[in-house]
């Protein structure tokens, strides 16, 4: 946790912590400060209301909201703030996360939530999307993001080179 956080990561339960940590890690790779809190749309609606209503004035610019099952957290956050909201659907034991995904993604017109993939991949992408949103008005950050993408592409090229050297069944 650092000073002047730009991103607020909220999660519906402490059981979401390990997944949502991926969002925090992605932000940390770009030196983006963030705060993370547990608050539930269903169990602590007042806490969600109070935190989200005060967020813009405190300097937050993006929300990342992760929740599972009837996952209303991202939608409720979006209903309370005009800041961009990225929703991360949690994997669940009963329906595999399809429940969380549909609850998060199917927002009615007017109140958008940018929904990522289910689970850890989605949480990482939520962090990276928050970086993109902030980078749109921050040239330094934009350059960092381009360098990050270029290094990912370079790794793919290197992996392909390596694959060609291997005696692998597809290449026979
Ligand atoms: C949601 O219900 C949380 O986001 C969590 O993913 C799910 C289960 O919560 P716990 O029963 O583990 O607290 O509100």
Image: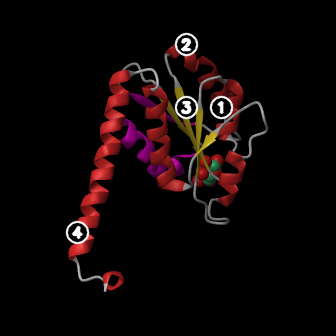
**Residue at the image point whose x is 60% and y is 33% from the top:** 85
Rendering coords of residue 162 (x, y %): 22, 69
Quarter of the image that includes the N terminus: top left
Q: Residue furthest top?
A: 57
| Residue at the image position 64 percent from the left and 20 percent from the top | 53
Mark earlier in primary sequence (3, 1): 3
Label 4–label 3 contact, CB within 8 A? no
The image quarter in which residue 52 lies: top right
Find the distance from the CA under tag 4 to the CA under tag 1: 46 Å
Q: Determine if the C-beta at disc 4 is less than 8 A from ligand 1.
A: no
* Residue receiving disc 4: 162
Q: Position of residue 7 (x, y in %)?
A: 47, 29
Q: Earlier in the sequence, mark 4 or mark 1?
A: 1
| Residue plotted at (45% across, 24% down) | 6
- Distance, label 2 to label 3, CA atoms, is 14 Å
Residue 110 horizontal/vertical position (percent):
76, 30
Quarter that holds the C terminus: bottom left
18 inside magenta stretch? yes
Report helix, strand or loop for mark 4. helix
Instruction: Say which of marks 4 and 3 sits in front.
Output: 4
Q: CA distance from mark 1 to mark 2?
A: 15 Å
Q: Which residue is mark 1?
A: 77
Which residue bears the numbered disc 2? 57
Residue assigned mark 3: 63
Residue sticking out furthest to the left: 165
N-terminal of the two: label 2 or label 3? Answer: 2
Magenta segment boundaries in residue numbering: 13-38
Q: Nearer the viewer, mark 2 or mark 4?
A: 4
Evaluate if marks 3 and 1 touch, with contact meaning CB atoms under 8 Å apart: yes
């Amino acid at each position: 946790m650092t000073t002047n956080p730009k991103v607020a990561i909220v999660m519906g339960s402490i059981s979401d912590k390990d997944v949502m940590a991926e969002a925090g890690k992605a932000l940390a790779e770009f030196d983006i400060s963030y705060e993370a809190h547990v608050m539930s749309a269903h169990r602590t609606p007042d806490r969600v209301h109070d935190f989200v209503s005060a967020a813009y004035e405190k300097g937050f610019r993006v929300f990342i909201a992760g929740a599972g099952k009837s996952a209303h957290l991202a939608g409720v956050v979006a209903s309370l703030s005009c800041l961009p909201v990225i929703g991360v659907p949690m994997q669940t034991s009963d329906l595999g996360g399809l429940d969380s995904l549909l609850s998060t993604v199917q927002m009615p017109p007017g109140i958008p939530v940018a929904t990522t993939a289910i689970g850890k991949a989605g949480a990482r992408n939520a962090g990276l999307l928050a970086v993109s949103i902030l980078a749109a008005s921050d040239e330094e950050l934009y350059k960092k993001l381009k360098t990050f993408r270029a290094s990912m592409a370079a790794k793919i090229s290197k992996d392909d080179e390596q694959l060609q050297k291997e005696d692998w069944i597809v290449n026979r």
